[in-house]
Amino acid sequence: HVQLVESGGGSVQAGGSLRLSCAASGYTISGYCWAWFRQALGKERGGVAAIDSDGSTSYVADSVEGRVTISKDLAKNSLYLQMNILKPEESAMYYCAADAALGPCWRGGWSWSREYKYWGQGNQVTVST
């Protein structure tokens, strides 16, 4: 049984930082593409960042370039998202997701939610002014 559990969300003031964690059980983070998505009320779910199967390559959305870092800890079988200089419009539910196919992320499609089979339950991030 695959289970992804996010933590680390909460409320922060604009300009602040948060670190989200995603602990995986029943599934290894090694060998697969993993990603973070977010979805605000009334909006579509969009990709924030993804990291390759071996952790050597990562992708981030243009809107968060330079402010977000995605990483893996193989020993803890966990995925992380460090977010800095947060903006109010980035308030959303944040989800971690895992691809079911072995191999690297697809450069042209890492941000497509349909590329991922396993999803966490979501973690709310609220950025206040």
Image: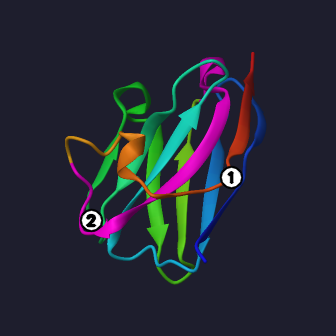
SS of the residue at dot 1?
A: loop
Question: What residue appears at the point 66 percent right and 37 percent down from the top-left corner?
Answer: 93
Res. 92 image quadrant = top right
N-term mark: 1 or 2: 2
Res 99 label: none
In the drawing, does residue 94 fall left or right of residue 60?
right
Q: Residue at x 62, y 56 (%)?
A: 120
Residue carrying label 2: 56
| Residue bearing mark 1 | 121
State the image coordinates of residue 44 (x, y, percent, origin top left).
52, 25
Looking at the image, how many numbered discs can be counted on the residues? 2
Taking the magenta stretch, the answer to whether it contains residue 2 is: no
Left or right of 12? Residue 110 is left
Give the quadrant of the N terminus: bottom right
- The amino acid type of the residue labelled 2 equals Ser
Q: Which residues are magenta?
A: 86-106
